[in-house]
């Protein structure tokens, strides 16, 4: 589509992004792909569908929520149980019991404080941040609408580790990436499958293959794990994951990744057309989407320039991975303009 190429070329010309990989398809077939620009600005390495990129907060949905669905299918997690049942070493006082679902949907009350520069749990040490998570109370009671915060997904990674007896990266590797053939995906560091020529550099990093999110970077650097950011993956690998969701957890020729009943916990609905409203962590709406998509899509975006989306009734997915280097709002608006054209 010449319109999509024009949007991306304008973004590159105006130094909003360095490059992009776009892939769209159905359950069975790819229907559109386009790669333009570069994986970063200094080496001029071209973007490809197998370029390995840190996808920032897309990690929350692709790794965090998927791991929750796997555990729910196995009876390891009840989404409506208080999260402290799975994290008994949490010591801070709560306004009332907070469920796992409320953490996933960003309605828990854990969040940033307006006007305060730094996050309540922040420390230069990633290990200390994880310790602080267990003694820092939420600044507000649970909310009716999503109050988006990484805090929730750092706690969820702790819960997943307690429930599975495995580190969060190891669990995702064994129970998600390997079954789906996502060989170029890894949490906390770039996968060994990619040489330097396949690594992208995202905003706020010093070199390709580094984590852009400053909290996740410290936690993984210091030996911890988190589900808020830190996933390295490719457009091709993400297409395998999204096809699994379009099949409601089924994997051809292999056991189901998660059950139909567990998928229903995250399936899109028409409960609230509010920007940021979530279904088990997946957004079901964005102000840049056409209203026709409301109630039919699951999506998530990443700060450093990535958006993935599924249209469930049409069994269609769209992936737009960019190496953002400029204006956040313009970059996001352009990604959704591309997705709108792919949905036509």
Image (cartoon, rainbow, N blue to C red):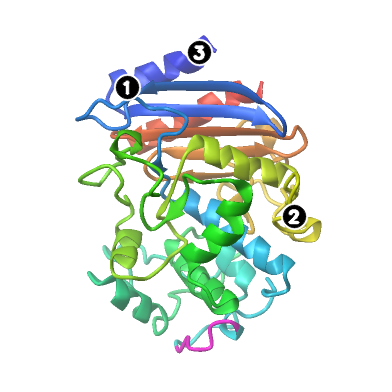
The stretch in magenta equals: 86-91
Residue tagged 2: 256
Nearest-to-viewer mark from 1 and 2: 2
Q: How many angstroms separate mark 1 from mark 2 (CA)? A: 41 Å
| Badge 1 or badge 2: first in the primary sequence | 1
Where residue 161 sits in the image (x, y, percent)? 52, 74
Above or below — where is 224 with respect to 299? below
Where residue 22 sits in the image (x, y, percent)? 50, 27
Label drawn at residue 230: none
Residue tagged 1: 12
Q: Is residue 131 magenta?
A: no
Q: Main secondary structure of the magenta part?
A: loop
Front in this rendered view, residue 265 or 144:
265
Q: Residue at horizontal 62%, vertical 75%?
A: 99
Q: Residue at horizontal 27%, vertical 32%?
A: 40
Q: How many angstroms separate mark 3 from mark 1 (CA)? A: 14 Å
């Amino acid at each position: 589509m010449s319109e999509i190429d024009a949007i991306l070329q304008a973004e590159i010309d105006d130094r909003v992004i360095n490059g992009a990989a776009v892939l769209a398809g159905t359950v069975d077939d790819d229907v559109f792909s386009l790669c333009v620009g570069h994986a970063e600005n200094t080496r001029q390495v071209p973007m490809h569908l197998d370029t390995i990129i840190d996808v920032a907060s897309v990690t929350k949905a692709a790794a965090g929520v998927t791991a929750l669905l796997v555990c729910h299918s196995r009876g390891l997690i009840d989404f409506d149980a208080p999260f402290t049942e799975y994290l008994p070493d949490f010591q801070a006082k709560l306004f009332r019991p907070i469920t796992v679902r409320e953490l996933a949907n960003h309605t828990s009350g854990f969040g940033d404080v307006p006007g305060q520069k730094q996050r309540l749990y922040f420390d230069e040490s990633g290990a200390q941040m994880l310790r602080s998570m267990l003694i820092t109370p939420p600044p507000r009671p649970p909310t009716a609408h999503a109050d988006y915060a990484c805090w929730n997904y750092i706690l969820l990674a702790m819960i997943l580790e307690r429930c599975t007896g495995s580190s969060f990266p190891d669990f995702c590797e064994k129970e998600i990436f390997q079954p789906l053939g996502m060989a170029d995906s890894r949490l906390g560091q770039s996968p060994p499958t990619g040489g330097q020529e396949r690594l992208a550099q995202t905003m706020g990093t010093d070199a390709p293959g580094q984590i852009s999110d400053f909290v996740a970077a410290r936690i993984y650097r210091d030996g911890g794990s988190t589900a808020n950011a830190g996933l390295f993956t490719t457009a091709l690998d993400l297409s395998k994951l999204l096809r699994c969701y379009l099949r409601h957890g089924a994997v051809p020729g292999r056991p189901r990744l998660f059950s139909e009943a567990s998928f229903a916990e995250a399936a899109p609905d028409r409960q609230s057309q509010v920007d940021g409203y979530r279904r088990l962590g997946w957004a079901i709406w964005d102000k840049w989407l056409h209203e026709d998509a409301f109630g039919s899509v699951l999506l998530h975006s990443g700060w450093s320039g990535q958006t993935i989306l599924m249209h469930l009734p049409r069994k269609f997915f769209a992936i737009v991975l960019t190496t953002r280097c400029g204006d956040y709002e313009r970059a996001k608006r352009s990604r959704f303009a591309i997705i709108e054209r792919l949905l036509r």
